[in-house]
Image (spheres, rainbow, N blue to C red):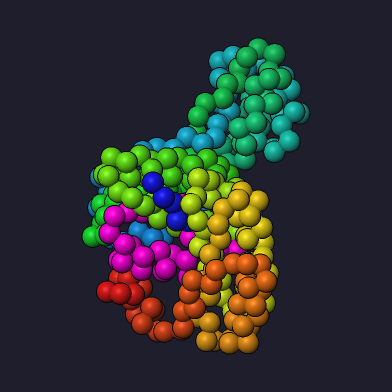
Amino acid sequence: MKQLVVISGKGGTGKTTIVAALATLVREKVLADCDVDAADLHLVMDPKVGKTEGFEGSKEAILDQGKCTGCGVCREGCRFGAIVESGSSFSVDPFRCEGCGVCAYLCPVGAIALRPRLSGYIHTSSTRFGTLVYGQLEPGEGTSGKLVMQVKQRAAELVQLEGKELLIVDGSPGIGCPVIASLSGATAALIVTEPTLSGLHDLERVLGVARHFRIKALICINKWDLNPAMAQRIEEFSQRQGLEMVGQIPYDDTVIKAMVRGKTVFE
């Protein structure tokens, strides 16, 4: 199985639009949307979800009022202000709790325990272009890297089960944990950039991540004709770095019309 991961140094460069276009052209593949903080490939794919699995990526503290003596040691030890005092009793604010476990460790009577928290979902679906697996992280959750790994694992299993040859991944933007998780096991990374100074800067950053993990990087400049001079600078940078420029896509409002209709650009 080969994995093509489409990434970008920042959001909004057009990587999801390109993944949707590739979904139209490539037949023997499974799709995975690993931009779990803001997954949107499904908006174009119009998937029929066959299975939804809960993702427990973090933990939360649960306080047993029957055991609590009101000593306040837990509140003193919590650095996030998640232990709330009300009169002579205490409770845990689930929105502030980070699941670190300090309160449970300090409690002298064992009144606090940690339990898994539902942090998001993994959706397995069918689309007019084949199977799509995508993740959905709950607001405020900080376990995006773990969810990306599980989305990719599920998609890879389906590649094998369906006898496909390729996994196309819509990766997370930036250079953080979800990007690293998106790149794991990749055959190649298609880096989508735009002809701006910040686009070049972000390209350099995400290229550094790909190279750190020894993943072959390919470059695509989206909307290159909006700033030909900057596009030329990016092309020259790619040549100096020994990178293959696989595409320069001109601006076309057909893309906008397609997105409004929930279609790929080729449709």
Residue 19's place in the image compared with 125, above or below, is below
Residue appearing at x 71%, y 20% in the figure: 106
Tell me if residue 121 can be seen: no
Depth check, front residue: 138 or 90:
138
Vertical placement of residue 69 versus 195, above or below: above
Q: Is residue 189 left or right of residue 263?
A: right
Residue 41 appears in the figure: yes
Front-lying residue, 129 or 212: 212
Q: How many dots with numbers?
A: 0
- 44 relative position to 94: left or right: left
Q: Is residue 186 above or below residue 193?
A: above
Q: Is residue 151 left or right of residue 82?
A: left
Residue 202 % position (x, y): 64, 66
Is residue 42 part of the magenta span, yes or no? no
Q: Quadrant of residue 205?
A: bottom right
Closest to the observer, 194 or 147 = 194
Residue at figure coordinates x 44%, y 51% from the top left: 3
Query: From this viewpoint, which residue is outermost toward the top?
Result: 109
- The residues colored magenta run 6-35
Q: Is residue 116 above or below residue 242?
A: above
Residue found at x 70% / y 38%: 80
User: Which residue is at the front of the view, 70 or 216?
Assistant: 216
